[in-house]
Image: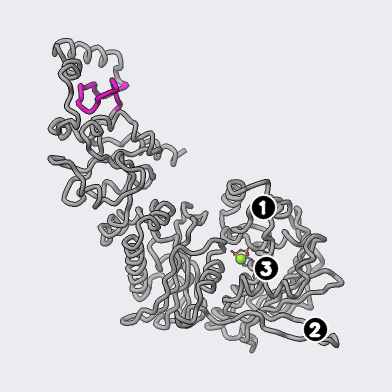
Amino acid sequence: MSEETLSFQAEVSKLLDIVVHSLYSDRQIFLRELISNASDACDKLRYEGLTEPALLEGDATFRIRLSVDKEASTLTIADNGIGMSRQELVDNLGTIARSGTQAFAEAVKARQADDKADLSLIGQFGVGFYSSFMVADRVDVVTRRAGDAHGWRWTSGGSGTFSIAEAPEATRGAAITLHLREDAHEFLDEHRLRTIVRTYSDHIAIPVEFVGHDENGTPTLETVNEASALWTRPRDTITEEQYTAFYRHVAHGMDAPWHTVHFRAEGVMEYTGLLFIPQERPFDLFTPERKPRLKLYVNRVFITDDCEALLPSYLRFVRGVVDSSDLPLNVSREMLQEDPRLRKVRSGLTRRLLDEMARRARDNEEDYLTFWTQFGAVLKEGIYEDFERKDEILRLARFRTTASTTPVSLETIAGRMKEGQKALYYITGDDADALARSPQVEGFLARGIEVLLLTDPIDEFWVSAVPTVHDKPLKPVAAAGADLDALPLTEPETAEEAQERAPTDQEQLDRLIAALRATLGKDVADVRASSRLTDSPVCLVAKEGSLSPHLRKLLSQANQ
Ligand code: ADP
Ligand code: MG
């Protein structure tokens, strides 16, 4: 078959446009992304080779090779992994599987400073390959899928189209050749390449070899990375820098982990976990999939990073690796999801993570709040999704209140309840400052009663699953009713104020209410006098048992 030219999916073209024209300064991350793909490709073949040994073609020694051609100004990253068929080339390098591009484009814009887009997070969106176009004006991929008789050459200049032709010279795996842009010749420098590999890819469990030349021009091979699976090493032999580098590798991020936990679980199920809680929110946190992204290994063989059974979705911000020798290697990924042993691992990981969070909260509340601010909204999903651990998660939760702009625990709030206060009260909405000034809370403020200000969409949902907190009912302010009348004002009213407020004439008040009812008609369910207000003349309240206005707004936004 002769060469065929195809168009990129519109999404890809848009993305490439951002990538090609960005003035991003940390361009070297393209190498991290390409090496990570090469390593994934080797992992995939190792896994498929378990059930179909013929695919290995007698060669199971995986490696990634870097070489430069200074004359041609090219850099090649070659692996002997799974490779791609023609269709896979079209699908993987011409379209975008995950719906990440839009989110990515927005994220880039949001983080843009001085016209310099921040592309460091490109890998998080499942589009790392395209980062090659930050440094190359043409990219060739020569590949043969394991088991296939012959291979293919994919080539593109990054604008609009790519071409595919047969490639008889292709060996198993994929070789990505970057024709470096004039301004990217620094990546021909062996020294520089070695440094980048050590920084970003030291913990890749497959050897990254550098093809160099000695004084006589004879090619030499040198392994540049550590090539050991970091999680299998004893904790005391691993430096913080190594943990951070590994975290960046699994999370495709640039931040450092807020928390690292590395442990070996023994007992019914043996496994090693190396888990990280990021400092910053990954961008896919609130996508509808809500999928956790831990990497699952069995005896150091990569199985999948798409295993929903491994963590509850309210912990989906956690990144890292789980490796077990007690799981079967030769079952399908789908079967694995159902495996009761995996459920054991999941509950063990959840237990440990929640314990670690509690410990960090005990150790340093201020530092804990940096975590809570990033991930609290996700963790709170567990309050109604994980009945068993509801109370534990409530203990980890922190809330802004009318008495405190720094989020505080329910224990603290319960501990300073007013004498005679029958319940803990909350109000929901978008903006805590606005809620704190709302007429709805006036009556509470006047009585020195602290009200929880709930501003995460998720708050509307878990509150219904939590009838009581510290033995006190948890109630929306609108349901306070007579509770409030029974409590004294903090500053007793002057006789004058009381005079002013008290309905001097019940008859007059009744007439006013009747007039309001008549005027507002069907727009309101009822008009009532209330002790909830101290300064404002009126406020709107949801009918008891009906959706709160905030929830109604959220639902209509979701349905739009
Ligand atoms: P991601 O790695 O998150 O899937 P990328 O944009 O980095 O996103 O890569 C897109 C896809 O292209 C990969 O999922 C994989 O299927 C394919 N791919 C990329 N590089 C290679 C390679 N060296 N060998 C085999 N397949 C590859
Ligand atoms: Mg990738």
Ligand 1 is in which quadrant of the figure?
Answer: bottom right
Residue type at mark 3: give it: Leu
Which residue in the structure is indicated by mark 3?
31
* Count of numbered marks: 3
Residue 15: which disc?
Answer: 1
Q: Residues within 10 Å of mark 1 (few under 14, many from 20)?
A: some
Are the two marked residues, 1 and 2, in contact with CB atoms closer than 8 angstroms?
no
The residue that label 2 is drawn on is: 213
Q: How is the image coloured?
A: one colour
Looking at the image, tell me whether mark 1 or mark 2 is earlier in sequence order: 1
Q: CA distance from mark 1 to mark 3?
A: 18 Å
Residue at left 32%, top 41%?
453
Queried whether the magenta region covers residue 236, the answer comes back as no
Q: Is residue 338 above or below residue 124?
A: below
Q: Nearer the viewer, mark 1 or mark 3?
A: 3
Q: Amino acid at mark 2?
A: His
From where the camera sits, is residue 121 visible? yes
Extent of the magenta region = 523-540
Front one among 515 and 521: 515
Helix or strand or loop: what does disc 2 sit on?
Answer: strand
Secondary structure beneath disc 3? helix
- Rendered residue at 82%/74% (across/down): 69
